[in-house]
Image (cartoon, grey):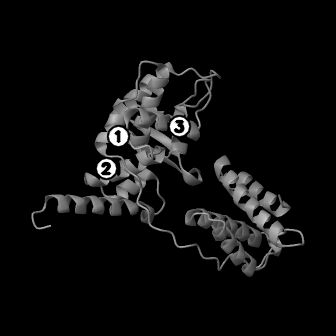
Amino acid sequence: MHPTITAFLDHLRNERNASAHTIRCYEDDLSQFCQFLAETRREEADPSAVDARRLRRYSAWLNGRGYAASTVARRLASLRSFYRYQRRQGVVTIDPSGGLRNPKQPRRLPRLLRVEDVIRLLDGIPTGEPLGVRDRAMFETLYGGGLRVSELVGLDLDDLDLEQELVRVRGKGRRERLCPVGRMAASWLARWVALRQPKDPKGPAVFLNRFGTRLTTRSVGRLLETYLAGLGLDLGASPHTLRHSFATHLLDRGADLRSVQELLGHRSLTTTQIYTHVTQERMLDAYHDAHPRA
């Protein structure tokens, strides 16, 4: 790892208070950039000595390796952040990433579960054992509050206000927000909290694995896959699908876009507007199915 990249990662960790996941993504993206430099330059692969032309070649190199447009865009975004930091530190005088253009991405609507399928999923989780109660509480909370899976596994006991049916989550950029999760999720959370047995008696994590330590996002995804397969539901669904379904079901039932933005923790309303396309498609489907002149 080049020293300039190490300094940037330290900046993210110590000054920006970035999450471990964010730092790992930046490290992977910038390591690949160094790999490209090492393969295409005979001299030392120094990111600080790169010009705009070299960055355009890197973008083409990524495209040539068959990466999805979203992956290329993320890796270029990591470079922009790195070079903005380099410029603030006076390491470079001109930001070579200023002219980088992201590849055009196809607009993909989020995958959704119908209301009846969400209910079937939740009701299909067996709750005769403590871990089943945990899983019911987890997926009720994901759907009831529209949480990201990282927000779910990051919940601590102090974040729960079950009387008010609220949880406090830390979203992207460590921004905190209060999320209503509804009566059903609050009820199942209360049942799980009464059963949970942490390895450390003072352990704060709400959702624990069988060893008494904090559950991971990957484990939540694997559990969902198991339940979907057992119930014959869409195997392409992920924990994030429950978040998408949460937003769409609210809009379908008359919630305003600004409120849904706040509930999801989106900084920009533009991010939330993708769900209006989903509801418009459903509206048109209903029209074509029902109107006699359609």
Question: Whole-Å distance between the Cαs marked 3 and 2?
Answer: 24 Å
Tag 2: amino acid? His
The residue that label 1 is drawn on is: 118
- Location of the N terminus by quadrant is bottom right
Badge 2 marks a residue whose secondary structure is helix
Tag 3: amino acid? Arg
Residue 43 % position (x, y)? 90, 72
The residue that label 2 is drawn on is: 249
- Residue 249 visible at all: yes
Q: Is residue 25 above or below residue 50?
A: above
Pointer 2 with pointer 1, Cβ within 8 A: yes
Question: Whole-Å distance between the Cαs marked 1 and 3?
Answer: 17 Å
For marks 2 and 1, the one nearer the N-term is 1
Badge 3 marks a residue whose secondary structure is helix
Badge 1 marks a residue whose secondary structure is helix
Q: Residue at x 78, y 79 (%)?
A: 93
Residue 76 % position (x, y)? 65, 68
Q: Is residue 19 above or below residue 273?
A: above
The answer to which image quadrant residue 283 occupies is: bottom left
The residue that label 3 is drawn on is: 222
For marks 1 and 3, the one nearer the N-term is 1
Find the residue positioned furthest to the left: 292
Tag 1: amino acid? Val
For marks 3 and 2, the one nearer the N-term is 3
Q: Residue at x 41, y 53 (%)?
A: 111
Nearest to the observer: residue 57 or residue 213: 57
